[in-house]
Each structure stands twice: as C-alpha cells, then as structure tokens.
Image (spheres, rainbow, N blue to C red):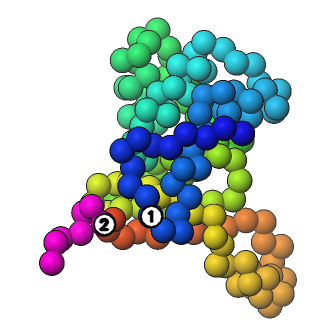
Amino acid sequence: MSVSSTPSSPRYPGADRDARPDVSTIEDVLHGAGYRSTRPRRTIIETILDQAHPFTPEHLLAAVHRADPSLGRATVYRTLEILGALDVLTRVVVAEGHSAYVVGLPGHRHHLVCSGCGAAVPFTACPVDHLMAELSRTTNFAIQSHVLQFIGVCPACQPTP
C-alpha cells in the first residue's frame, strides 16, 4: 500500500503521522471489498484526502459540492458509511464534543486530538490490550473492540514559555 504524508503536518515522536492513504490505496481497498470505483466516489475520496483536520459529514458535503455540485447527499453519506465500514475512516470526538471523521490506512489505530486546532494524530501503539484481556476474564464479556482517544494541546497550540 502506498501512503502519502500530510504536507504541512508536523511530525510527533511515536505517532504514525505518515500513515495516510492516497486515492489509489483507498480504491484498492474498495475493490478488495467488491465495490466499484466510480467518478463520484473518486471525487469524494479526493475531497476527504484534502481535509487537514477531522471533518463532519456536513463539512464534507459542502466541500464535495464545491468540487462537483451534481453529487447528492445520499452518495456522500453512503460513501462515508462504506469507507467507515472498511476502516479507512475513523470517528473521533473533537473538542466541541461532536463526532468527526479522520482518514487513515485500514488497521487498528487510535488518535491524539488537539483541543486547540483540531489536528488528529494517529498512533498504533495499543496500551489497553492487557486491560481488555483482564476485563474479559473478570466480567465474562466477549470484548470485540475498543476505542481510545486522547485530547490535549499540540505543540503548535501550546503557549510559549
């Protein structure tokens, strides 16, 4: 799989900042799951990849309409749902308390979200595996997955000393 980095994104130690797919990688994921590559989907994917920060469906719809006013709401929302199911999009909770999406390579990942600028930095280290096993053992829950997100202030938004 090929990845591209976000051009103006700072690098953070321990973060997987460069783990960002490109259009062809996302289309390969779609094809692998039996979905066709269409012009509307490609426009939506390109618009998603243009987003520098987590985005809401409404924000994406407005951006897609600037690129192609003929694309309908249902097409955008359906594509978001498909990409979410294929683990290309992940939902995060932003500082304002609402859900937004971030794009990434399929696979297990978590995020650091800046409460100042809204930047979302993915990381794959998973510090809760042991806790999940222990919880499963002590509660008899068949834990299927988990979500981990940290909210803080990125270096660019921190006040200078």
Range covered by the magenta-colored residues: 155-161
Q: Is residue 21 left or right of residue 46?
A: right
Identify which residue is drawn at 66% across, 14% down: 38
Q: Are marks 2 and 1 in contact (CB under 8 Å)?
A: yes
Vertical placement of residue 158 versus 84, above or below: below
Provide the residue designation for mark 2. 155
Residue 128 location (% of width, % of height): 67, 79
The tag earlier along the polypeptide, 2 or 1, is 1
Could you tell me how many numbered marks the image carries?
2
Instruction: Please tell me whether mark 1 sits on a helix, a strand or a loop.
Output: loop
The type of residue carrying mark 1 is Tyr
Task: Name the image quarter holding the N terminus.
Answer: top right
Quarter holding residue 142: bottom right
Residue sitting nearer the eye, 78 or 52: 52
Q: Is residue 8 left or right of residue 1?
A: left
The type of residue carrying mark 2 is Pro
Identify which residue is drawn at 43% across, 22% down: 64
Provide the residue designation for mark 1. 12
Residue sitting nearer the eye, 147 or 48: 48
Instruction: Please tell me whether mark 2 sits on a helix, a strand or a loop.
Output: loop
Identify which residue is drawn at 73% across, 65% down: 145
Q: Main secondary structure of the magenta part?
A: loop
Q: Is residue 155 left or right of residue 83?
A: left
The crowding category of the residue bearing disc 2, from other C-alpha atoms within 10 Å (few below 14, some 14 to 19, many at least 20), is few
* 21 drawn magenta: no
Task: Name the image quarter holding the C terminus.
Answer: bottom left
Residue 24 location (% of width, % of height): 66, 27
Q: Is residue 149 visible?
A: no
